[in-house]
Amino acid sequence: MSRKGEIRKSIKSHVSVLSPVERKEMSLAVEERVASSPEYLRARSIFIYHSTADEIDTSALIDRALSEGKEIFLPRVEGEDMVLVPYRRGDEMRVGRFSIVEPVGEPTPMRPDLAVIPLVAFDRDKHRLGRGKGYYDRFLADYDGVSIALAFSLQECSSLPVEPHDISPSIVITDKETIR
């Protein structure tokens, strides 16, 4: 197993022991940090991932942003790419290729003001380890806005292996801190 694979396995085992109450509390702490950040407050449009059970829950942040009149875009995997699809409450969703809930609507070429992305692990230098397919790295390589990665504080590693195609987020926000 590669070093990245070992790190993914280790971090996933740490996250898996969190109780539903701990996950909810940590996710709400992250939501508050994001919603009070200048980047979020300035953003009119936000690209945000639809969370899975082992990630920071983004549902409250999505609802909050919609309530504040912000435009929301969710990702959908199409082949080797990830497309952005405008989202409004009640829009049709389906389970996609990696068992992740995705929007059904038409993709847009629009580039939102802010991108909120997931990760499996991170380090103090804001290096990000994802699930290994490179969808977010390819998106970020073409994106010139601010990106915020959301994490449980226990997903932090002392260092991560970095490859030339790996793109770091602008900011990492955890339940305990904001790393700029």
Image (tube, rainbow, N blue to C red):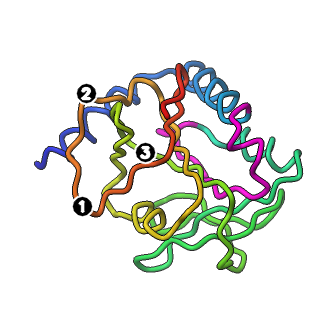
Where residue 76 appears, as percent x and y from the top left, is 57, 69
**Image quarter for residue 63?**
top right
Where residue 171 appears, as percent x and y from the top left, is 51, 40
On screen, 34 above or below 131? above
On screen, 115 above or below 86? above
Is residue 34 highlighted in magenta? Answer: no
Residue position for label 1: 164
**Range of magenta residues:** 36-56
Residue occupying image coordinates x 31% and y 57%: 166
Q: Are marks 1 and 3 in contact (CB under 8 Å)?
A: no
Which residue extends farthest left?
Answer: 1
Where residue 49 appears, as percent x and y from the top left, is 59, 53
Residue occupying image coordinates x 68% and y 78%: 108
SS at mark 2?
Answer: loop
Where residue 134 appears, as percent x and y from the top left, is 36, 63
Identify the mark at residue 119; answer none if there is no mark. Answer: 3
Is residue 50 highlighted in magenta? Answer: yes
Residue 158 visible from this viewpoint: yes
> Looking at the image, is mark 2 or mark 1 nearer the viewer?
1
Classed neighbour count for the residue bearing mark 1: other residues with Cα under 10 Å, few (<14), some (14–19), many (≥20) = few
Classed neighbour count for the residue bearing mark 3: other residues with Cα under 10 Å, few (<14), some (14–19), many (≥20) = many
Circle 2: residue type: Ser
Identify the mark at residue 158; answer none if there is no mark. Answer: 2
Marks 2/3: CA–CA distance: 15 Å
Is 81 on the left or on the right of 83, as rendered?
Answer: left
Q: Which of marks 2 and 3 is nearer the N terminus?
A: 3
Residue 49 visible from this viewpoint: no
Circle 3: residue type: Leu
**Image quarter for residue 64?**
top right
Identify the mark at residue 177; answer none if there is no mark. Answer: none
